[in-house]
Image: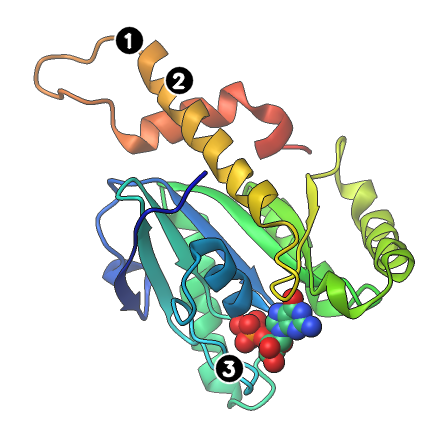
Amino acid sequence: MNISSAIFDCSAPDLDSCPDESLPEFAFIGRSNVGKSSLLNLLAGEQGLARVSPTPGFTKLINIFTMNQCWRLVDLPGYGFAHTSRGHRARFNHAVNDYLMNRPNLCLVFALIESGLSPQKMDLEFVEWLVRHAVPFVLVFTKTDKVSAVAAQANITAFTNRISAWFEKLPAVFTCSATSRQGRSELLGVIADEMTAITTAASRAPVPPASSAHPSLKARVRQNRKVRPDLHRPW
Ligand code: GDP
């Protein structure tokens, strides 16, 4: 998939402030400092699309971008803000939870995990939360340039072993490095596949009544989740 345009839509403090539900959305989330902003810039092909910060927890709003005029990239606040007050943290968590559970046009979450670390409690708890709330997701292990391939694979295996009991089939696993650009085409390929599946589901949908010219995106996303159970609902 080529990215021909990446346009900032808005920074939303909560679900109600997000734009209309007319486009499929792909959300990225991970612990602060996991390399999310760097990855989003890599995917978009634009430095500065998502702000790269040396301070963990800098991105505190739901930042939304329209890509190629047909899908949205959603930059969710990192979890585990080491330097904010408890009250602040709770508020952001609520907005993220609300978005993940209630956004009808959310297609897929990319859960980012640092490949150089052994399984971290906070990441495991977040993945468990996604599973419990039936949120469709894939795992993306970041910063692969920082560790040897053997060490990264050992951490990935340790992580997937810890979560395997929650699934019949594990979610898809990807690796990436914003520094070496590794993983860019694979991750954009996942989004391209999803977009194709949504379009196919729409073309197979029964002809809607005259009053609603287009099947709602919510219906198309729901249909797509049914036809792609392998990727969307691996458990
Ligand atoms: P965020 O807090 O998750 O958005 O993380 P950032 O993208 O701001 O990155 C946090 C730090 O990790 C910054 O110092 C980045 O330069 C660094 N970083 C991000 N991605 C990579 C990567 O793929 N490789 C390496 N070596 N460093 C990275």
Amino acid beneath label 2: Thr
Residues under numbered marks 2 and 3 in contact, where contact means CB atoms less than 8 Å apart: no
Q: Residue 75 at x, y = what percent?
A: 43, 62
Note whether ligand 1 is within 8 Å of mark 3: yes
In the rendered image, which residue does mark 1 sit on?
206
Disc 2 designates what residue?
200
Contact, mark 3 vs mark 1 (Cβ under 8 Å): no
Mark 2 Cα shell of 10 Å, populated few (<14), some (14-19), many (≥20): some
**Label whose residue precedes the other's in the sequence (2 or 3):** 3
- Observer-nearest of 64 and 67: 67
Which residue does the numbered mark 3 point to in the structure image?
A: 53
Q: Residues within 10 Å of mark 1 (few under 14, many from 20)?
A: few
How many circles with numbers are drawn on the protein? 3
Q: Amino acid at mark 1?
A: Pro
Structural distance between the alpha carbons of marks 1 and 2: 12 Å
Give, as a three-letter code, the residue at label 3: Ser
Q: Secondary structure at mark 3?
A: loop
Q: Nearer the viewer, mark 1 or mark 2?
A: 2
Q: Where on the image, by quarter, is ligand 1?
A: bottom right
Side of 123 relative to 208 (left or right) = right
